[in-house]
Each structure stands twice: as C-alpha cells, then as structure tokens.
Amino acid sequence: MDNLESQEMELLALQNIYEERDFKIDEMNPPSEHLPPINLCFRFPETYPLQTCPAFLLSCNWLTLKQLSDLCRHLESVWDSNRDAILFTWFQFLQDETLEFLKINDSLDITELLKFKIQDNFRTRVPSNNESCEDSGATATKDCSLQDMKTISELLNLKPSISGGCNSIDARAFNMLNGKNLIQLLKDHNEKKKEEVFRTSTHVCNICFLEKEGSEFIAFRPCKHSFCIECVKLYFEGQIDEGNVNSLHCPDGECDSQADGSVVRQVVSKELYEKYDTILLSRTLEDMPDVTVCPRRLCQCPVLLDSSGRMGTCAACSFVFCALCKMAYHGVAPCVFKKVEKLSLYQEYTKGNSTVKKAIEKRYGKRFIKAMVEDTLCENWKSSHTKNCPHCKASIQKIDGCNEMMCSKCGTYFCYQCEVELKDPYEHFRNCLVSNFDVERTEFDYVFEPEEFLNVNFR
C-alpha cells in the first residue's frame, strides 16, 4: 500500500468514526475534467514577424508564475526558430501541448497556488538594486502600493511586451486570482463545461424513456440526476396543485434530493411558481416559532414576535396583538378564547404527553392552563347534568321530582325536558310529548316456563 492509498484509508476511517459536523474533508485538489483557459493577449509590433516576435501577455489561474514564465520563454523560442507567422503554432501548442510541456500528468498540484496573492505578480517583477532591465514590460517599481485594488488596476493596465525582462519570473506572465478562491473557480468552471457538453449531446429520459437533446433536460441539485423538462413539468404541476410543495423530490427511486426554487422556476408557469412560492413561504413561517401572521384578514403579513413570544407588532398595518389569542394585545390580563378554540386547547393539553403539557404550560402559563382545564371540566359536567333557565340562562340541576321546575335565581317556571317557560303547567303537560314525571323502564326479568301460557290440554 503506497502513501496515497494509506491517506485515503485513514480519511475514510475518520469519516466513519465522526459525524459530518465534527469531521469534514475539504478537497485541496478537487476532481476536474475541464480546466479554465490559458489567456494570451497579443499585439503586432512593426518589426513582426521578421525581426521581433509578437508582444504578448500570458495569464492562467491554475498555473504558477514560474510555469507561465516557462511557457512565455518557450513561445518566444518557437518564434525565434521560425522567424515567420507564428500565432497559429502558439495556439496549437497552448491548447494541445501545455500539460505535456509542464510535465503535468494525472493530477494538478495547486498547493503553491493556494498561498498566492495578486500582489505577488509585482513582488516577483521588482528588480534588485544591481539589476537594470530594458523593455521588460513591467510597470511596477519598489515604491508601488501593494493594496489589492491598486494592484488589480495596475495589472489591467499592463500592456503586451516583446521581452520578458531579466528576472526569474517573465514580465509577460501574471495571475489575476487570489489562491483562496482557486478551488471554487476550478469547481465552477468544471461544472459549467460539463453542462455545456451535456446540452450538446443526446440522452434518454428515465421517466418517458425517450431520447432527447440535452437542452431539453433539467438537472436536480445536488444529486445531478437529469430528466426531460416535459416529464418533470407534469410531476411538479401535480404536486403543487395538491399543495405538496415540500414533496418535489428527485424522481429517481433511490434519491431523496429536493428540487430548489431555481429548478421549479425553469419548469412551471409563472402563475404556478407564484403559488408554489406562496405556499412554501407559508409552510416555512409555520415552522418558525418566533414568526406568525398578522391576524387581520386584509393584511396577513409575516410578523416577528418579541423576545417573550407573546406580542407581535405588524410592520404593514401597525396592529399590536397577542400572539396566543390573536386579539388586541392585553398585557398581563389572561387571554379570552372562543369556545371552539378553548375546547381545542383543552383536548391538546389533556391528550398530550408530559412534553406537550410542559410546552403548553410554558406558552400560556401554568395558572391559566389549570383554570382553563377546571372551567372546561365544569362546563362539560353542566352540559351533561343541568338545563338552562329559558329566562336568565342559569344552570339548573334536577335531583328528583316532576319536570315542572322553578328557577331559584329568577323564579321562572319551566319544563325541564322541553326547556320552555310555563304559563299554564297543566295545559303544557297535557300537550307535551313527555310526562310530568320521568318513568324509568326496567328490564322484564321473569323467566317463562315452557308452555306456561298455552291454553292446550295435553293428555
């Protein structure tokens, strides 16, 4: 096992031991099929091609200044060997033979480039006190500022030069990218080129199994699975119409990647995307404990609650409300719930586990919840065991006796069964479908003997 294999095995073992938040591998040399181009800027001097080569500048973000200098000197030597029109030969060399010339085989080592700063372009060009260079093309001096903006400006003002100067780094070579941004540049360029190649070739959709141009496909991120736009559009439209905005998963059976907004926007119509965006925003706000919606029907704007989570101030309509009961803010006074809301809260509290109960008590206050439960139990008992006086609505319980009741609060006579005020009790009970007395029917428990009531004489 060589060093590279040992390194890979060690990293794999650490990945299996630790969670992603504790151990993450940042690839220093990310896999790349396509590299950014080498840039050649040139101009023809009056003495080209017989006496001088073209004046030029050479830049490339994934090559060091030393490598670029070697290329510059090689280009100049190629012209010197021919003393003729040379640009096509340079282009072919840069495009097809650069990696071989620099002895770059299977991998590209960018370790040195990660430490590179834009200012280094000029540090390498400043001649020593004993050196004198003619026609070097370098514009920097010892007194030049090394601030980023000025450095970039000076680089942009560099003009193609015939000679590379007398320093170890050729004056015609420069790099426009700080090393810390190099990895992302390589990744982005590689992805862009892969997409271009995909769009110009044909592929088979794994949903409809038809062969289509790559430009008719859409790719999910980050899984990179691609399907034809027509199939994905039908799939998205069905899910969004049913409100399943969080179920726009990759159609691949073994993938759970979620489609992001940019993918949805490219596929569905503008009206359907607005519906998707509205529902998604609503679902997201519902999952945020410190955000609610303004209770005014004509507003419905998102509102950020205060630190206590009890008061909200709508920035759109300036309505200040209680986050619990959705009414105007009432300070320390207890919330007044509607009957349906109160019953729903009671059921949630009584049927919930200890965790749910503690969360509700913390939100509404333990004293309020206790009083609410007692009131609800009392109301449930009264609805099952009492009737309301038709005049003053007082709760009346019948313990014994007839159905003619007198309210102990207002003195009104009423029928306990019909809950109707009695003006003539005798007339009412003559016409009422119920008796003045509640007759309890009992089950007949006598056991008949066989043939006991048959009027037959058996002999």
Image (spheres, rainbow, N blue to C red):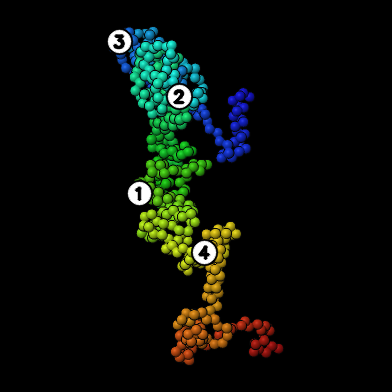
Please, what secondary structure does the residue beneath circle 2 have?
loop
**Can residue 100 be seen from the camera position used here?**
no
Read off the residue under disc 4. 345
The residue type indicated by label 3 comes to Thr
Please, what secondary structure does the residue beneath circle 4 have?
helix
Tell which of 79 and 242 is nearer to you: 79
Q: Which mark is residue 410?
A: none
Q: Rate crowding at label 1 as few (under 14), some (14 to 19) or many (20 or more) other CA atoms within 10 Å.
A: few
In the image, residue 131 sits, relative to residue 271, either above or below, namely above
x, y percent for residue 258 = 47, 44
Of marks 4 and 2, which one's residue comes earlier in the chain?
2
x, y percent for residue 70 = 44, 15
Check whether the beta carbons of the residues at disc 2 and disc 1 lie within 8 A of each other: no
Check whether the beta carbons of the residues at disc 4 and disc 3 lie within 8 A of each other: no
Tell which of 161 and 255 is nearer to you: 161
Q: Nearer the viewer, mark 1 or mark 3?
A: 3
Of marks 1 and 3, which one's residue comes earlier in the chain?
3
Q: Mark 4 and mark 2: span between their CA atoms?
A: 64 Å
Say which quarter of the image contains residue 355: bottom right
Read off the residue under disc 1. 271
Residue drawn 37% across the image and 14% down it: 136
Read off the residue under disc 3. 47
The residue type indicated by label 1 comes to Glu
Q: Mark 3 and mark 2: span between their CA atoms?
A: 33 Å
x, y percent for residue 116 = 47, 25
Tell which of 12 and 74 is nearer to you: 74
Residue drawn 40% across the image and 34% down it: 214
